[in-house]
Image (spheres, helix red, strand yellow):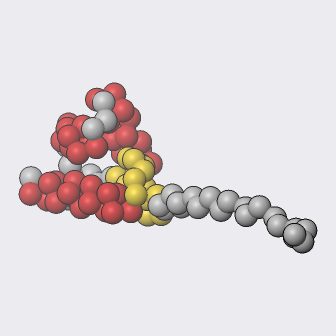
Amino acid sequence: MADTNTKPRTKTVVKTARPPLHKVILLNDDYTPREFVVRLLKAEFRVPEAQALGIMLTAHTKGACIVAVFTKEIAEEKATRATEFARNEGYPLMFTTEPEE
């Protein structure tokens, strides 16, 4: 029997890449009541009242505020639903998305 050098095979572990994340951004406007914004943030994004108030005030003072970070599809869906809800209530409130860096 001949000596053969055999090397054990190396195991290849495949890691799935995390999907790219996107930020949902609340844009300030001068017409939508603050109470409505807080109510919408609590309902659509499931944030506590104190956090919703902070998001609303930051958008009010700085012009925009990041609401949450999700995968692209979820971020776009939530931003669209929140914007449409505001439009249906007669307010120009707007949410946008952008890739997280």
Query: x, y (%) of residue 78?
Result: 27, 55
Q: How many marks?
A: 0
Q: Residue at x 16, y 54 (%)?
A: 86
> For the view shown, which residue lies furthest in the top direction?
50
Q: Residue at x 44, y 63 (%)?
A: 98
Residue 28 in the image: above or below residue 35: below
- The one nearer the camera, 32 or 74, is 74
For this view, does 58 lie left or right of residue 38?
right
Query: x, y (%) of residue 100?
Result: 51, 58
Q: Residue at x 58, y 61 (%)?
A: 14
- The one nearer the camera, 22 or 3, is 3
Residue 8 in the image: above or below residue 1: above
* Residue 81 seen in the figure: yes
* Residue 100 seen in the figure: no
Residue 1 in the image: above or below residue 37: below
For this view, does 45 lie left or right of residue 87?
right
Residue 1's quadrant in the figure? bottom right
Residue 101's quadrant in the figure? bottom right
For this view, does 70 lie left or right of residue 13?
left
Residue 30 in the image: above or below residue 20: above
> For the view shown, which residue lies furthest in the front direction?
1
- The one nearer the camera, 23 or 58, is 23
Q: Residue at x 39, y 47 (%)?
A: 68
